Image (cartoon, grey):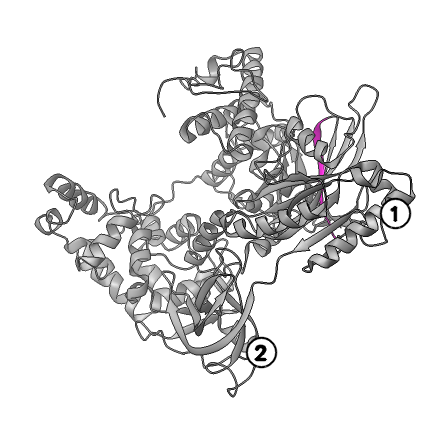
């Protein structure tokens, strides 16, 4: 981004003339310890307003005015000040990042019924709807010639109710049965496009209806990420949005790319000095913009039913250009008084109608089934089809997802199947229309790439070849070089692909056979870049044991588990000789993970790769546990905000011999309770008779053992 001031236009949450963090914000902040509490509070208020402004610019208007790196610095400074001076508030932008997990979703009653909408794909049904509306309104004394419609896309996401009191976000719930839904307040709070504070002139009480969805580009990227982790991808964006919003852990929701559109007012109470509700749906959209609620920019006002039908036809033509899924349009009588006169049935509004697109399905024949091996070793069956046109696109292949899907469908070569395609989502087969084969496709027991045994994990199947499977090579090398593994600079995805295509790296040990001259001959390389990579690889030959284990890409073994393994076994040979029972004795490792680790390390190809790496000079160093014994035998769990980050408290007690776990059990000695604690851990503590102590009592326990609190930097 250039140093010149960008065109800012109208600001919503922060005035750039009064707030220095809006345009070209300074990031050379003074040290926290040099700030007075009053100075910190002032800076926090400015940062909150600026971050809200930047969130709105980025997530709602898609028109950012600062670079991502600058935003990250502002956000981190805000977090730092809130933690240091205990200034957290529920509506702070920092509270979007997640929260305490819940055991289950509570059921809450909606402010007003969230009814459904009658739908059709036949334009004559839409004209009948228009005839009824005009007839009933004419009989009620309305001027039927003045009845217009507000038209909007019909989103294919998850409908929610969101409530604001005095402009502050207080609750969100799924539609459920229309009368009651699941309380997803903390999950929805993490959506960046949702304002935690409304702006401008706000009503005393506002309940709005919106649609949570996952943008198509973000959906594709997210599906790739979870497939690389060996997890089952979502079938479509709607399933991804619905599955995400019902996650019990808000931290998980915060990591997923959800967005939201608002399209209706469910309840509006102005209060003594608040604004009155707009008179039309069209004015609702304008008011949403004033309040900071994101609405769709494809909404239109039309004068009659012909305009509404034309709107739907135009939306169908641009459907595949949108970055979100729609399955039709919604036609609403514009005037609210007219809507009130028309009323509703027990299940649907009588003033709205959905004009849907034709279904995007066709039937064709399965000509073959091929099994692809992904970078994680996950095997994905793909149906090769007799080419068929679906919504203007020729489809010749469709995913069958996994072996379980094949068994449930009962599909095999020669069967006539229905193919479903939605936007940019990979076509898939929802059903067999006519069976021409016997049984279902016989899924292979061996990897089609390396011949290793195929292991079933729930509905999915994986190649057990690990480091010796060529299909998994690029991922294995990329994982080896990651920052939280061996941190080999210059060995990113593009470089790994180039090295593989050049025939220089066909296995992980080949990295340590690379020579400067052959690297320098590659396109885009020179002697300097070749020397740098060789030096980086040489420097990675003596990693701590935990980093070596994390780099291997063992299933379920991230940096934390790798540290526990290294600390428990001490050296690589002891770890390689361990059986499943021994792995189960390691902290936070259960039976399933113990079996995963043992299977990986005992697999012939993986063991050969590890020995080959050692022969080439890779010598993992044991991790010496530098811990005291002052708190040996004690187990702590922490909840809520402490005077220092909880991670530091956990590290401190572990450094002095105690255990710090994430959940309360009968083995827990103390639950340390900070500010704004979660409820689930406290309930677990009560049910297990675990003492709950505040930070001051925690400090006394540490002092009794000669340990200073808070810890020194």
The residue closer to the viewer here, 345 or 157, is 345
Query: How far from the left and from the top, in percent, is residue 192?
Result: 56, 36
Q: Is residue 383 above or below residue 297?
A: below
- Report the quarter where the N terminus lies: top left
State whether residue 548 is above or below residue 698.
Answer: below
The residue that appears at 44% across and 74% down in the rendered structure is: 385
**What's the magenta region?**
167-176
Mark 1–mark 2 CB contact (< 8 Å): no
Q: Earlier in the sequence, mark 1 or mark 2?
A: 1
* Numbered label tally: 2
Image location (x, y in percent) of residue 289: 64, 30
Residue 649 on image: x %, y %: 52, 35
Quadrant of the frame with the C terminus? top left
Q: Secondary structure at mark 2?
A: strand
Please say whether residue 168 is one of the residues in the magenta stretch.
Answer: yes
Circle 1 is placed at which residue position? 136
The residue that label 2 is drawn on is: 433
Mark 2 Cα shell of 10 Å, populated few (<14), some (14-19), many (≥20) = some
Residue at image position (46%, 25%) is 65
Q: Residues within 10 Å of mark 1 (few under 14, many from 20)?
A: some
**Residue 506, quarter of picture:** bottom left
Report the residue at 69% width, 57% height from top.
Answer: 123
Q: Residue 25 sits in which quadrant? A: top left
**How far separated are the C-alphas under marks 1 and 2?**
44 Å
Q: Nearer the viewer, residue 358 or 703?
A: 358
């Amino acid at each position: 981004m250039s140093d010149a001031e960008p065109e800012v236009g109208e600001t919503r949450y922060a005035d750039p003339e009064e707030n220095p963090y809006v345009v070209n914000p300074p990031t050379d902040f003074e040290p926290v310890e040099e700030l007075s509490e009053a100075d910190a509070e002032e800076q926090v208020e400015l940062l909150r307003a600026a971050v809200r402004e930047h969130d709105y610019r980025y997530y709602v208007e898609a028109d950012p005015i600062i670079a991502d790196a600058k935003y990250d610095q502002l956000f981190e400074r805000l977090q730092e000040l809130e933690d240091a001076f205990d200034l957290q508030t529920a509506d702070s932008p920092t509270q979007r990042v997640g929260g305490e997990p819940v055991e289950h979703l509570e059921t809450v009653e909606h402010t007003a019924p969230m009814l459904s909408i009658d739908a059709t794909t036949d334009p004559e049904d839409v004209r009948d709807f228009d005839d009824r509306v005009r007839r009933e309104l004419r009989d009620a004394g309305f001027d039927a010639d003045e009845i217009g419609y507000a038209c909007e896309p019909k989103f294919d996401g998850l409908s929610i109710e969101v409530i604001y009191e005095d402009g502050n976000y207080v609750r969100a719930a799924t539609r459920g049965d229309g009368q009651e839904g699941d309380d997803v307040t903390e999950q929805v709070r993490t959506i960046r496009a949702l304002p935690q504070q409304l702006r401008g002139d706000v009503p005393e009480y506002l309940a709005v209806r919106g649609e949570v969805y996952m943008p198509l580009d973000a959906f594709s990227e997210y599906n790739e990420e979870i497939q690389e982790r060996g997890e089952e991808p979502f079938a479509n964006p709607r399933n991804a949005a619905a599955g995400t919003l019902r996650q019990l852990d808000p931290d998980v929701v915060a990591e997923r790319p959800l967005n939201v559109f608002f399209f209706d007012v469910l309840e509006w109470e102005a209060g003594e000095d608040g604004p009155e509700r707009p008179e039309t749906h069209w004015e609702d959209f304008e008011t949403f913009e004033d309040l900071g609620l994101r609405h769709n920019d494809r909404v239109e006002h039309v004068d009659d039913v012909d305009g509404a039908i034309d709107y739907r036809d135009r939306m169908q033509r641009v459907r595949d250009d949108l970055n979100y899924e729609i399955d039709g349009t919604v036609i609403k009588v514009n005037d609210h008084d007219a809507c009130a006169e028309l009323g509703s049935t027990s299940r649907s509004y009588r003033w709205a109608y959905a004009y849907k697109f034709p279904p995007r399905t066709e039937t064709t024949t399965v000509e073959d089934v091929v099994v692809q091996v992904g970078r994680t070793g996950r095997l994905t069956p793909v149906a090769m089809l007799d080419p068929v046109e679906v919504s203007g696109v020729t489809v010749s292949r469709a995913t069958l997802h996994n072996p379980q899907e094949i068994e449930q469908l009962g599909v095999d070569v020669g069967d006539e199947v229905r193919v479903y395609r939605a936007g940019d989502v990979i076509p898939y087969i929802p059903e067999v229309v006519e069976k021409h084969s016997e049984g279902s496709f016989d899924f292979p027991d061996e990897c089609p790439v390396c011949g290793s045994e195929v292991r079933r994990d729930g509905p999915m199947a994986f190649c057990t070849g690990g480091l010796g499977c060529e299909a998994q090579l690029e991922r294995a090398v990329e994982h080896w070089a990651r920052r939280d593994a061996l941190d080999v600079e210059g060995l990113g995805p593009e470089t790994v692909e180039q090295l593989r295509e050049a025939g220089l790296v066909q296995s992980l040990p080949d990295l340590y056979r690379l020579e400067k001259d052959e690297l320098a001959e590659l396109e885009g390389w020179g002697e300097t870049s070749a020397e740098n990579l060789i030096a980086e690889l040489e420097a990675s030959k003596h990693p701590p044991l935990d980093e070596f284990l994390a780099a291997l890409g063992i299933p379920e073994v991230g940096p934390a588990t790798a540290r526990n393994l290294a600390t428990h076994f001490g050296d690589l040979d002891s770890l390689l000789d361990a059986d499943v029972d021994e792995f189960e004795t390691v902290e936070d490792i259960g039976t399933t993970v113990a079996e995963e680790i043992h299977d990986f390390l005992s697999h012939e190809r993986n063991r050969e790769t590890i020995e080959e790496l050692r022969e080439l000079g890779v010598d993992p160093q044991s991790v010496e546990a530098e811990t005291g014994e002052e708190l040996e035998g004690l187990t702590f769990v922490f909840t809520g905000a402490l005077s220092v980050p909880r991670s530091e408290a956990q590290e401190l007690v572990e450094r002095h011999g105690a255990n710090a776990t994430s959940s309360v059990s009968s083995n827990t000695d103390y639950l340390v309770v900070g500010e704004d604690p979660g409820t689930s851990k406290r309930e677990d503590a009560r049910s297990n008779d675990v003492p709950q102590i505040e930070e001051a009592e925690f400090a006394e326990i540490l002092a009794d053992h000669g340990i200073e609190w808070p810890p020194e930097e």
